[in-house]
């Protein structure tokens, strides 16, 4: 059997088995049911903006870890590789998104983000958890997995 990732379609909620070799080849998989493009197939965090936040994060059928960051923030740069790892490891079970607070002040203000890095976990469009500052990877995973049950 081929090595594959299970990726949930954000549009219809169908679970799709996507061969890893196709993802690594740079092909964009689509949902077998509704033909919508599948997110995070690359195993990289999804970059969201004020304009795309509602569609990509709040309407996601999966829990979403949102990294609120800025390029000038040292701690944000320190945790960036871990956020990338989490995106790859959680693909198909949770989404990982990044929002640059300097470029997207409306969403940052809406969620009252006063310190960065701020890691927000949303499920069903609602914020259910928040971590401020650098966090150990196992703590982030523990909090995400609690929501995936």
Image (spheres, rainbow, N blue to C red):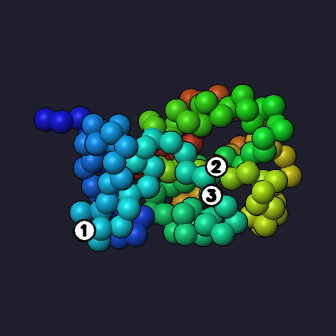
Give the x, y percent position of residue 101. 78, 53
- Write down the residue under mark 1: 33
Q: Position of residue 124 (x, y in %)?
A: 52, 66
Q: Which residue is mark 2?
A: 98
Mark 2: secondary structure: strand
Q: CA distance from mark 1 to mark 3?
A: 25 Å
Residue 48 badge: 3
**Depicted 12 relative to depicted 143: above or below:** below
Q: Residue furthest right?
A: 114
Q: Secondary structure at mark 3?
A: loop
Q: Outermost residue, left direction?
A: 1
Query: Closest to the observer: 78 or 24?
Result: 24
Residue 7, visible in the rendered structure: no
Of residues 149 and 35, the one drawn nearer to the viewer in this rendering: 35
Q: Quadrant of the N terminus?
A: top left
Q: Is residue 130 left or right of residue 16?
A: right
The residue under the point 67% across, 61% down is: 49
For numbered disc 1, what is the local secondary structure?
Answer: loop
Q: In the rendered structure, which disc, 3 or 2, sits on the residue that comes first in sequence?
A: 3
Mark sitting earlier along the chain (1/2)? 1
Q: Residue at image x 24%, y 63%?
A: 32
Q: Position of residue 142 (x, y in %)?
A: 54, 37
Tag 3–tag 2 contact (CB < 8 Å): yes
């Amino acid at each position: 059997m081929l090595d594959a990732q299970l990726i949930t379609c954000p549009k219809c909620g169908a679970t799709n088995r996507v061969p890893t070799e196709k993802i690594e080849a740079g092909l964009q998989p689509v949902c077998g049911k509704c033909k919508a493009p599948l997110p995070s197939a690359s195993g990289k965090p999804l970059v969201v903006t004020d304009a795309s936040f509602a569609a990509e994060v709040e309407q996601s059928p999966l829990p979403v870890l949102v990294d609120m960051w800025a390029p000038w923030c040292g701690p944000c740069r320190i945790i960036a590789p871990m956020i990338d790892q989490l995106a790859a490891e959680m693909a198909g079970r949770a989404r990982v998104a990044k929002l640059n607070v300097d470029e997207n002040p409306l969403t940052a203000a809406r969620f009252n983000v006063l310190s960065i890095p701020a890691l927000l976990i949303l499920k069903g469009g609602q914020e259910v958890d928040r971590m401020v500052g650098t966090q150990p990877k196992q703590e982030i995973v523990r909090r995400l997995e609690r929501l995936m049950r």
